Image (cartoon, rainbow, N blue to C red):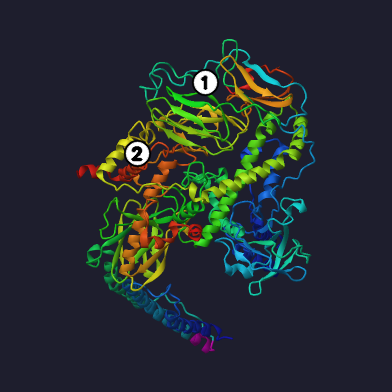
Amino acid sequence: MNKFWPLFFCFWPIVAVVAFWISPAMNWWFPGMAMSPLGQQIDNLFYMILVIVGLVFVGTHIGLGYVLFRGVAHEDEKKSWFSHGSHKLEVLWSVAPAGILLFMSLYQLDVWMRYRVKSHFPDEVQPIAEVTARQFEWRIRYPAPGKALMPTPQPDDLYTVNDLHVPFGRPVMIRLRSMDVQHSFFVPELRIKQDAVPGTVIPIWFETVDEGDFDLTCAELCGWGHYKMRGRVFAERESQFQHYLKTLQAEQDYDGVRELGSTGAQIAEYSRGPHKQAGH
Amino acid sequence: MTRFTFAVLLPGIALIAMGCDLNKVDPGGGISSDSVVTIRNGSSAATPAGGDGGGGGTAVAAASGAPGKLIGTIKFAGTPPVLPPKATKGNAKDPAVCAKDADIPDESLLVGANGGLRHVFIYLDKAPGEGTAELPPAGEFDQKACIFTSHSFLAIAEVEFGVKNSDAVAHNVHTFPALGAVQNFGMEPNSSTTMSFNKAEKAPMQIKCDIHPWMEAWALVLEHPYMAATDENGNFELPELPGGTYNVRIWHERGAKNGQLERAKVTINGETRLDREFPAGDFKL
Amino acid sequence: MKFSDTIVCAVALLGIAGCSSNSVPQFETSQDTGKLFQPARDAVESELQAAFGTPENLVVWPDLPVDFGSFGGSIEKVTTQGTLVVPLAGQSALATDERLPELSGAAVLVAPAAGGEKGAEGGENAAAVYRVAHYDPESKTLRVVDENGKPTQVTAAEGDGVQVIGDGLQKGRNLYLKHCMHCHGVSGDGDGPTAPYLKPRPRDYRKGIFKFTSTKTGVRASRDDLFRLVKLGVPGTYMPSFMLLPDDEVSAIVEYVRWLSMRGELESKLVVQLALDFGSDQIGPKRTFADMSTEFDAFRGSDLPDIVKSAGEELGADWSAPEDAENLVIPKEERVASSLESIARGRKMFLSEKTKCYSCHGETGAGNGAATEEINDLPGQPGVKAEVPGLFDAWGNIVKPRNLQRGLFRGGRRPIDIYRRIHSGIKGTPMQAFGNNLSDQDIWDLVNYVLNVPFEKKTQASH
């Protein structure tokens, strides 16, 4: 029975090692694989920290277990003695973590710069849409096909809501704004989380490695309807993306008379209800 | 703490921690209840209470007596309050047209020299079974000098009538029916069109012009022609009715009880008079 | 021990008592109904109860043009007692074949084929009501029980029509309670728990009026209009986009909203019929409560069923009309391309005496025209001046003419949307219909101008 506590504290490092080992494969840490190169680097940073923290955790627990085991192994009842500590040890366990932290903060600078510092953004990245967060939705403005996004609305801009389409395979930039309170643009699978602050326009860039649709959620409690502030990010082929813009354009220029042509059938499903489709 | 304490405390805390989510069905929105659907077979759910069918509502009593017209005078008892004009001469919007030559009067309480009250609607709620009066020719609704003429308008449901804008400014005709469809259309200067009301109403409806907020009229839409509006002396005349007892509504826009001044029971036997005098207390003033 | 245990017991009791808080959703009667005298109020409530039920016991009134997710078919063979062979097919978007095996418990209407001995049965609607015990889509065998779940004799013949009421309404109800109720209220009165904090106020459906429609003046909103509105939201208001809800869920919500609107309309139709005769304010020395009661009893027996019946027929006609293509506003001519000339013509039209657009929207389109400075009568209370200047909508709220400079279009920014706003007005607001006196060309010029207002300075500066 005396060995319970040493065994207890030695049991956890074993669990931890097993957990650390299998969790990436079991997808326990992240919501799926990072779908962007930068996201993969962020994941790598995370794993690096995980290894450091894991080693420390396992090490300290083994040490703790060992000390307890020693304590119960010595049958002779020696009186415990109290120490006011060792100056050398104090210095050691202050400097070592500080060094580790310093290392981590320097090591991640590269990723941080590429992610956030404008001068280190990929050269060719262009804003493709302006996303305006408001209670409780994401309003999206695209430039007309073939045009560049301007800072202010243009007559031929295209508008949609909650449905962000982006091409994959090249870096794209979003201009993030807020119309009312603070929101946060969070796409877990792309490892992007950026607050939208009223009064400022914040550029964020990302590159999606493959096709797919990803959840876009608000990660800043923004009001009673925070939970329903959900959107989608569709990563699609460049041609599909251009086609989407053309579809949006046709939908937006619809005058009720002109035939919509081939794009008509594909006009985003919201433009006509199922009833009308069934009826026609 | 005793074992008893634990036995009670733990489930209590557990319950609170669970958020009391004991309900199986939770459609969300804070509402935890399921629904069932039953079917309504047939179109009327009203359970007839075996009424006599005679005295209810505004139904007609057994026909007796000679046919005749209903005529009469509606008066305002006492001294009527003086209402300020809705816009004074030269001080209205669009001064080139509106209130150019005279003030725009407040027509909501017009009392004649003898106390006769203008713009009171007198009407039967229901057509008499064998009423024979012909539908009157449809009137014309005009907008002149930024005033609707007339202030009290009579119309038959689904019968078209002319609407005119005799002014050099645009107006709009915005109706506020209780049962029928709302209409709100623009009238360009010096134009005319036609309109009709799609459903009969229980009481006169307001008609407004949103461009000139003082412009206001009242229209009574029925399925039958047994209605009238009083003239400047408070006189009215209803078409000839078969003999019998009728419920006659006397309605004025300032009537204190939804506009209704009285629901009079009138027996027609030859030409019949209905004269009423209402004190200030019966009006919203 | 005694004292601490008392506290502990109290905590435990609180924990349990907290669970009884699950609120039961209830339809509320309108303020106007409250102004009737008690027996009339009770009658209105019981009519509504019979026609629409409660949120926990929804009533399907098959006469209403609501997609209840029903399945229909005609009987091929009556095998044994309570078992019929019927090929059932979905009759609407909410009734798909995948739902066929899940019909158990649904209500069944069996009606004689049209032209049969309908007259002989005496009733106008001689349908019999059962419930589905089981339906096998393979063999098309439908076993029915009576409404209480007991085996029963089915009086049916080959060729009789069978209608199985699906769960469309329940589905809509659950989704509505989840997504819409907290603003729009359980009864659709626009007065849910969140509503007091919102401006503009959430829509009160009970008038059957929706502002942004594709239909002509006086016609209700179509399903497509509501569907689009739920999917896209209303920019500039608190109505968010429900883009991510699947189409069938949005359709179910739309049907439930239409159903709630019909409920509200039935209520107000009944109240209008009763208010002049049976309002509690009519009780006085001339007409006592007893007089009124006697009269009302007779009225209830003789007139009320007819009133309900014709109100139901009106609802049916009114809510079917918007689905008719004839009632949609479709321009006859294509949009005039947006050019400086067209915009200039539109601007001239905007400022003309013909349309007087400027009188509400202001000369620069900022929504600050002279009409917004006028004191109007309070809505529904003619002769009573409002305390603040402004225009009112049908729900009694002050409504601001749209500030066109912001480029926010609540009813949609497509040219066709703006065309429809101009052509048939915005229902329930002072925005009037210009379809009568403007040509398509005029309206398209106005559309081009309105779409250009946010960019006006730039356009002028660059030329």
Q: CA distance from mark 2 to mark 1?
A: 34 Å
Is residue C29 something that shows in the picture? no
Is residue A65 something that shows in the picture? yes
Q: Are marks 2 and 1 on the same chain?
A: no
Q: Quadrant of residue A108?
A: bottom left
Q: Nearer the viewer, residue B27 or A38?
A: B27
Q: Classify 10 Å Cα crowding around label 1: few (below 14), some (14-19), many (20 and above).
A: some
Query: In the image, residue C306 lies at what x, y percent?
Result: 70, 41
- Magenta stretch secondary structure, dominant: helix
Q: Nearer the viewer, residue C348 or B130?
A: B130
Which chain is disc 1 placed on?
B
Q: Amino acid at mark 2?
A: Ala
> Which mark is nearer the camera, 2 or 1?
1
Task: Please give left or right for residue C322 compared with residue C119 in the image.
Answer: left
Q: Is residue B56 above or below residue C342?
A: above
List the residue tagged with mark 2: C366
Q: Callout 1: helix, strand or loop? A: loop
Q: Nearer the viewer, residue A21 or B109?
A: B109
Query: In the image, residue B230 lies at what x, y percent?
Result: 59, 19
Q: Is residue A140 above or below residue C429?
A: below
Q: Classify 10 Å Cα crowding around label 2: few (below 14), some (14-19), many (20 and above).
A: some
Query: In the image, residue A68 lies at what x, y percent?
Result: 50, 84
Q: Which residues are magenta?
A: A68-76
- Residue shown at the point (45%, 34%) measured from the top left: C391
List the residue tagged with mark 1: B107
Q: Callout 2: helix, strand or loop? A: loop
